[in-house]
Image: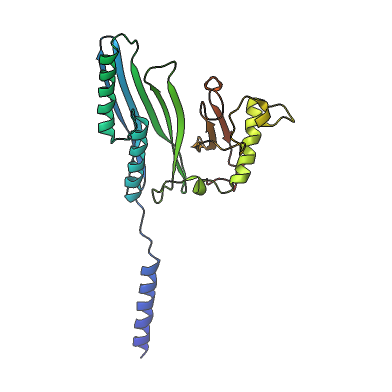
Amino acid sequence: MRFFYGLLILVWISCGSKKEEIPEIPELTFKLDSLQEKTCIGESCATLRLTWPVAEGGEQARKMNQLIREKLESLVQTGEEVLPLDSAKKNYFRNFKSFKSEFPDSHGGWEIEVEGDVTYQSDSTLSIRFNWMSFLGGAHPNHGKSFMNFDPQTGDYLNTDRLILDEEKLREQVEKKFREFHQVAEGVSIADDGRFFLPETGFFLANAMGFQDGKFWVVYVPYEIGPYAMGYTELEFSPEDLKGIVRW
């Protein structure tokens, strides 16, 4: 009987141990990939330069790479339809040749440049920053900055609701620093200042928000909240500034 009870205890311990086993998540690492291509008609050239991070690891890496690829495809888009990257590249150069054929006296070339890199990684959050520039003729190139934020454990994209823990408090902090950055006079609202583009709902958070160099960044790109000549409004916050407000 003692042997029987002892055996039951061993089986119970064994089963309990198995239940507590947690599958090990493969280590997430990154390497940089790139695509560079150029074609010329006379002295005018179309150039495409892309650099982006590629995740290596388990299922989370596959999910992240798919979303990163889709981001690149949207930035290389030269028409209304977002195409797979290889098709988007061919379409870009085909459109350039067609444009030069139709307007042979037009001066200058085309250029698209995208640089993506991992700028922050913790156990709960990973940020990839993209800097991009596109010039397809006109008075000046279009350019911008954006972030992609992920859960490194699952590879899931972190939308605003998951990245920001307290949106109202974050908006208050950003508005305060925005006023300091642009030296808005005390007692004057941002809406009444006259320099900024604001909707009827008032001050808003930028589209580009993410982590870089151990800080949280909120970046307003040209035309988002002010004219092109205003350039970028880049606001940085330390972990102490936004403790409990964003997902570090």
User: Who is closer to the viewer here, 18 or 165?
Assistant: 165
The residue located at (28%, 20%) in the rendering is: 96
As drawn, 16 above or below 62: below
The residue located at (55%, 23%) in the rendering is: 227
Quadrant assignment, res 2 = bottom left
The residue located at (63%, 26%) in the rendering is: 182
x then y, percent, for residue 13: 39, 75
Instruction: Looking at this view, name the residue that lies furthest to the bottom.
Output: 1
Q: From this viewpoint, is residue 241 visible?
A: no
Q: In the image, 72: left or right of 142?
A: left
Q: In the image, 183: left or right of 199?
A: right
Q: In the image, 10: left or right of 189?
A: left
Quadrant assignment, res 22 = bottom left
Quadrant (top left, top right, bottom left, bottom right) of the N terminus: bottom left
As drawn, 238 above or below 48: below
x then y, percent, for residue 71: 37, 36
As drawn, 190 above or below 148: above
x then y, percent, for residue 70: 34, 38
Quadrant assignment, res 119 = top left
User: Who is closer to the viewer here, 237 or 29?
Assistant: 237
